[in-house]
């Protein structure tokens, strides 16, 4: 059974979500720990700035306690049961959910394409740990195919908004013109890359990029004509910059309220705009209470997104039709794959009977006798099971057998009648 635990921007606030985020430093360890849990055969973890999702394929009817136990133990934070903070989905619902996520249909900003690379990277990590098997391999690859199909065949593909474009729009509300403003970007990930592109289009040239790994900061800056900064030295730049964008994997605040109180004394009444999309948060939320400090986190961004709801509804309907077709495709593959073992066992079962009877025959073979003997041996177990388990007048066993072997329906009815009579006579004895 496929199951997913999802904590995302639709069902949780950032203050809850950030307690369960995974990063590149602990994701390998998390997967190794999760796969050791009882009943879990395959697993995959997707952790981004606005969602944490754990996909597992298991042989248990109720795997939810195992997943909750893993998350709570790994993060040392108890996951309280509440439908407003997380959600479980299973089988087709879980498949549908991943396809929505990959296609951008479930993104905070509809159609935002960055999730595709995030899924690819998470899949790469899970594969390296060895937690991906046939079911999740097929599921994830089909989700990427579905994402491509949705973007090429629905109006979701026409969406051009992103976190980067939203940050620029918000910045313009605080600073009328951005050309002369300076920006400090914390982190060198894909979101930072997108923001730099939008800032460049606005004519912003004074951009500082900070990373804990100075090589990353230099490489990023060389590629984007920015200025590299060591993350530990950002307090030297905070007195001068106007906009601070943060998206790192830090487990602690990079800018605290106490630090900003000191910085503000050096800023000469200048406004400073913080945008923090990190999970966990990089910027102390108390900074938002300080004078001249404007702070937006993911919850704030979510509340101000106001796209054309009519157009969004149309796009989602188009995407939904494509996603449903992909869900059916995965379900068909899964059912076919599930039948492989029983088909192989059935072939081996029949082969052994035929081989044993032919090998045991001596001299001239009575073909009719041998055929009857083989047929009786092959059918011995199924017939006994039919007699022992079935209500012959409403027999699912017989219906399945007649469909599987394409048996004549009139003959089946006659057989049922004869077997029922035989059963009545036996009951009288």
Image (spheres, helix red, strand yellow):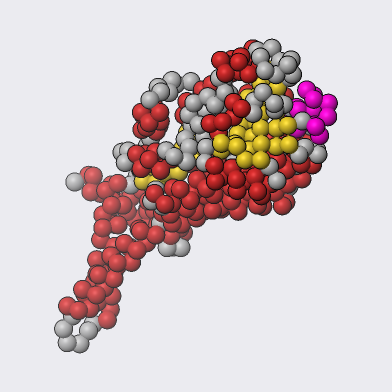
Instruction: Work out whether 345 lies above or below 52.
Output: below
User: For residue 414, which quarter of the picture?
Assistant: bottom left
Residue closest to the eye, 249 or 316: 249
Q: Name the side, left or right, on which 377 lies relative to 185.
A: left
Q: Quadrant of the N terminus?
A: top left
Q: Pick out the residue farthest to the right.
A: 176
Q: Position of residue 365 (x, y in %)?
A: 22, 84
Q: With 181 as the anchor, is 130 left or right in this view? A: left
Quarter assignment of residue 260: top right
Give the x, y percent position of residue 215.
54, 46
Q: Which residues are magenta?
A: 167-180
Give the residue displayed 54% in from the left and 53% down from the top.
Answer: 141
Instruction: Name the residue nearer the viewer: 125 or 41.
Output: 125
Q: Which residue sits at x=39%, y=33%?
A: 67
Please say whether residue 351 is visible from this viewpoint: yes
Residue 338 lies in the magenta stretch? no
The answer to whether residue 14 shows anywhere in this view is: no
Residue extending furthest toward the bottom: 364
Residue drawn at point x = 33 percent, y = 66 percent = 347
Q: For this rendering, which residue is in front, 286 or 267?
A: 267
Query: In the image, residue 191 lies at what x, y percent?
Result: 64, 39
Q: Decide whether residue 169 is among the magenta residues.
A: yes
Residue found at x 68% / y 42%: 226
Coordinates of residue 208 in the picture (x, y in percent): 66, 36
Q: Is residue 237 above or below residue 43?
A: above
Q: With 241 as the anchor, is 126 left or right in this view?
A: left
């Amino acid at each position: 059974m496929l199951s997913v635990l999802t904590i995302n921007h639709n069902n949780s606030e950032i203050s809850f979500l950030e307690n369960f985020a995974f990063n590149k430093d602990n994701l390998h360890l998390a997967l190794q720990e999760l796969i050791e849990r009882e009943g879990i055969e395959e697993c995959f973890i997707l952790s981004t700035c606005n969602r944490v999702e754990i996909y597992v394929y298991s042989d248990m009817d109720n795997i939810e306690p195992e997943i909750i136990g893993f998350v709570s133990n790994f993060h040392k934070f108890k996951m309280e049961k509440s439908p407003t903070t997380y959600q479980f989905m299973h089988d087709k619902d879980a498949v549908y959910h991943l396809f929505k996520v990959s296609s951008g249909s479930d993104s905070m900003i509809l159609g935002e394409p960055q999730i595709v690379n995030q899924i690819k990277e998470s899949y790469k990590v899970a594969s390296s740990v060895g937690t991906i098997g046939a079911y999740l391999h097929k599921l994830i690859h089909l989700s990427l195919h579905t994402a491509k199909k949705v973007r090429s065949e629905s109006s979701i593909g026409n969406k051009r908004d992103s976190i980067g474009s939203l940050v620029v729009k918000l910045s313009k509300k605080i600073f009328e013109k951005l050309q002369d403003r300076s920006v400090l970007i914390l982190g060198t990930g894909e979101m930072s890359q997108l923001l730099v592109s939008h800032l460049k289009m606005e004519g912003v040239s004074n951009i500082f990029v900070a990373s804990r790994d100075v090589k990353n900061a230099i490489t990023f800056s060389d590629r984007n004509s920015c200025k590299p900064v060591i993350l530990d030295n950002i307090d030297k730049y905070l007195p001068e910059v106007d906009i601070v964008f943060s998206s790192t994997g830090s487990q602690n605040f990079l800018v605290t309220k106490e630090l900003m109180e000191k910085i503000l004394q050096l800023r000469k009444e200048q406004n400073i705009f913080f945008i923090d999309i990190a999970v966990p948060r990089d910027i102390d939320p108390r900074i938002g209470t300080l004078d001249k400090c404007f702070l937006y986190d993911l919850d704030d961004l979510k509340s101000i997104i106001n796209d054309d709801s009519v157009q969004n509804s149309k796009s989602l309907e188009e995407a939904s039709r494509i996603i449903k077709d992909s869900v059916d495709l995965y379900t068909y593959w899964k059912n076919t794959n599930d039948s492989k073992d029983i088909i192989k066992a059935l072939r081996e079962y029949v082969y052994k009977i035929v081989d044993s009877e032919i090998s045991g025959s001596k001299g001239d073979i009575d073909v009719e006798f041998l055929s009857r003997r083989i047929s009786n041996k092959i059918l011995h177990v199924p017939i006994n099971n039919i007699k022992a388990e079935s209500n012959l007048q409403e027999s699912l066993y017989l219906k399945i057998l007649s469909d599987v072997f394409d048996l004549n329906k009139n003959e089946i009815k006659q057989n049922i009648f004869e077997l029922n009579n035989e059963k009545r006579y036996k009951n009288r004895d």
